[in-house]
Image (tube, rainbow, N blue to C red):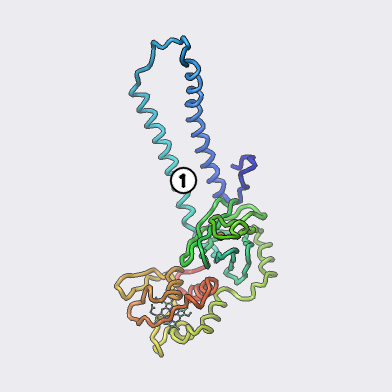
Amino acid sequence: MTLPVFFIPVEASAHAGQVDLLIWTLALLVALLAAPVFVLSAIYLLRFRYGRRADRSKAQRGSVWLEVSWSVIPFLLVMGFYVWSTKLFFEQQSPPDDAMTINVVAKQWMWKFQHPSGTREINELHVPLGKPIRLTMTSQDVIHSLYLPALRIKQDVLPGRYTQEWFVADKTGVFPLRCAEFCGTDHSVMGGRLIVQTPADFARWQAQAGADRSLAASGRELFDRLGCAGCHGSNAQGSESPIRAPPLVGLYGRPVPLSDGTFAKADDQYIHDSIMLPNKQIAAGYEPRMPPFGNVLDEEQVAQLEAYIRSLGGKEDK
Ligand code: HEC
Ligand SMILES: [Cu+2]
């Protein structure tokens, strides 16, 4: 429900329409509740002002029913909005399983995007119409926030941690993309464009943008180049020498027993931390002998290694 109001951005997803409907309904309700208060205040202020000879003999002493109703009715209304907005919030937290994952790395002062096909772009994000897209985001330096006004979504992007947001764009076109968290000198120009294309146009763009090597293939190449294979085995099957390291095949999405007796789920965050800060969580039955790669790799490379490890099996990734 886009009202023709100049300061409201266009809606480019069904979610955007739902957010607007919520906000407009809330605004309307507040206006309906506030209007009588202001109007009656003004009338009474004039009518019973000092020195005016109005009839003050029939002053109300209060009414239990009135008081109860103006407490209970707004309470129920507010609870209704609470349920409504919470439902929207949870929908926005849970991307569907068939979502396409695009990795986002924020840094002072640009946005970098990596598609599963391997295509990379800076400050521009091309997506196909009608397909669920999940953005897995992290920062190379300070806190940023990825804001897509046309989709009514905004999420902080933190160093050392993954956050996500997802959407299904339902309108082709070019929409603004912004950083919404003050992040230094050039924060104000840290933005770009979201470009929503029909699936055919998107495929054409991807072909000419040179998707020569998938994210997972780049990860595989890094895996060999960085010597991960030396410990984890050439196909990440695990090895006994020189240092015994766990196999990474089938790791993704699985619960991993840790040396302190607890379990961790091998999600993107776990794999990220296993590479960058290996001593944070030690796999049970192994020595903490893996060197930290936190100073060696940037976030884009970690995303490639993760894509490779995901491709080795475990939970499907599309
Ligand atoms: C010197 C040997 C060595 C090298 C090199 C090495 N690792 Fe490891 N890795 C280990 C050991 C030992 C463990 C188990 C102990 C731990 O959890 O830290 C491990 C654990 C892991 C885990 C967690 C596995 C699980 O089952 O919980 C991942 C993921 C991983 N490594 C990825 C990598 C990647 C990617 C690289 C290359 C950038 C790499 N490793 C390089 C030895 C190594
Ligand atoms: Cu920023």
Q: Nearer the viewer, residue 78 or 61?
A: 61
Residue drawn at (64%, 75%) of the image = 212
Q: Residue 154 location, x and y as percent? A: 53, 54
Query: Residue 111 falls in which quadrant of the image?
Result: bottom right
Q: Residue 138 location, x and y as percent? A: 51, 65
Describe residue 11's horizontal placement relative to residue 285 as left or right: right
Ligand 2: quadrant of the figure: bottom right
Seen as rendered, the residue at the extreme bottom is 242
Vertical arrangement, residue 253 with respect to residue 240, above or below = above
Seen as rendered, the residue at the extreme front is 51
Q: Mark 1 points at which residue?
A: 85
Amino acid type of disc 1? Ser
Q: Residue 180 location, x and y as percent? A: 55, 55
Q: How many marks?
A: 1
Vertical arrangement, residue 136 with respect to residue 220, above or below = above
Vertical arrangement, residue 174 with respect to residue 55, above or below = below
Vertical arrangement, residue 242 with respect to residue 221, above or below = below
Seen as rendered, the residue at the extreme left is 261
Q: Which of 198 and 78 is in front in this view?
A: 78
Q: Nearer the viewer, residue 86 or 43?
A: 43
Residue 194 visible at all: no
Residue drawn at (61%, 48%) of the image = 11
Q: Residue 303 location, x and y as percent? A: 52, 71
Q: In which quarter of the image is the N terminus?
A: top right
As helix, strand or loop, the secondary structure at mark 1 comes to helix
Residue 124 visible at all: yes
Residue drawn at (50%, 30%) of the image = 32
Residue drawn at (41%, 81%) of the image = 290
